[in-house]
Image (cartoon, helix red, strand yellow):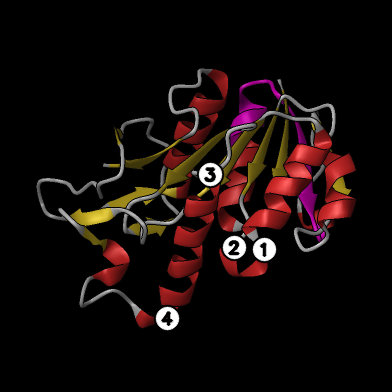
């Protein structure tokens, strides 16, 4: 497949690029400074900015899927959605956040007392992005939200999938590595199971 990754030089975006290349896909890595990625077979490095939707749309054209791995405070949902629409690509996947998952019935993680203040704004904007996607019927969108702790780790391929509720292990810890998150996202590109839905991944 031919996959465009917006925000390809970030912690998550770079792992998604790696995972897609590992599986033999052709990847277009789009970033403000794409030179931060090493050139490899099957990888095209392209300069692009999530804050320039008109300039972004032609960079996305002729791909099988578009992945957005951009911080929510650095982009507006309507701009990103319009850029994908303008490209003619129907499959759109978004790296979500954990804050919009339910920590308990009726209560989102972002609304719990001990949610970190430092990431509250980003989490709130992530929820607004999900709300915007839920109103989109002309794109085959999917948002994948990580667990509460989202960090560099190992590529194990062993994880669980959920829907709108935060996943936690038997020890009460809720976490996923960037590497295993990338596996779950590329799995979804190859075999869509959550079209026009959000899902989550965790150990």
* Circle 3 Cα neighbour tier, 10 Å, few/some/many (<14 / 14–19 / ≥20): few
First in sequence: mark 4 vs mark 2: 2
The answer for how far apart the CA atoms under marks 4 and 3 are is 29 Å
Q: CA distance from mark 4 to mark 2?
A: 14 Å
**Mark 4 residue element:** helix
- Residue range (magenta): 19-33
Question: How far separated are the C-alphas under marks 1 and 3?
Answer: 18 Å
Residue that appears at 53% across and 56% down: 129
Is residue 44 rendered to the left or right of residue 148? right
The residue beneath circle 4 is: 118
Which x, y percent locates residue 183?
48, 33
| Disc 1 and disc 2 in contact, CB within 8 angstroms | yes
- Residue 23 vs 59, above or below: the answer is above
In this view, the mark in front (3 or 2): 3
| Label annotation for residue 135 | 3
Left or right relative to 192: residue 147: left
Circles 3 and 2, Cβ within 8 Å, touching? The answer is no
Kindly check if marks 4 and 3 are in contact, taking CB atoms under 8 A apart as contact. Answer: no
Q: Residue 45 at what x, y percent from top left?
A: 84, 44
The disc at residue 75 is: 1
Give the quadrant of residue 19.
Answer: top right
């Amino acid at each position: 497949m031919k996959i465009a990754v917006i925000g390809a030089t970030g912690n998550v975006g770079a792992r998604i690029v790696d995972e897609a290349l590992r599986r033999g896909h052709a990847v277009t890595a789009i970033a403000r400074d794409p030179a931060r990625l090493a050139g490899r077979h099957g990888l095209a490095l392209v300069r692009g900015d999530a804050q320039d939707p008109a300039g972004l749309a032609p960079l996305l054209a002729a791909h099988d899927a578009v992945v957005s791995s951009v911080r929510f405070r650095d982009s507006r949902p309507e701009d990103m959605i319009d850029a994908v629409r303008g490209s003619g690509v129907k499959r759109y996947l978004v790296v979500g956040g954990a804050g919009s998952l339910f920590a308990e019935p009726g209560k989102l993680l972002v609304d719990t007392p001990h949610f970190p203040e430092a990431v509250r704004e980003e989490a709130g904007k992530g929820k607004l992005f999900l709300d915007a996607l839920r109103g989109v019927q002309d794109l085959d969108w999917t948002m994948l939200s990580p667990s509460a702790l989202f960090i560099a780790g190992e590529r194990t391929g062993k994880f669980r999938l959920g829907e709108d509720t935060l996943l936690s292990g038997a020890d009460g810890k809720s976490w996923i590595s960037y590497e295993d998150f990338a596996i779950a996202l590329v799995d979804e590109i190859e075999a869509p199971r959550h079209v026009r839905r959000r899902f989550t991944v965790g150990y």
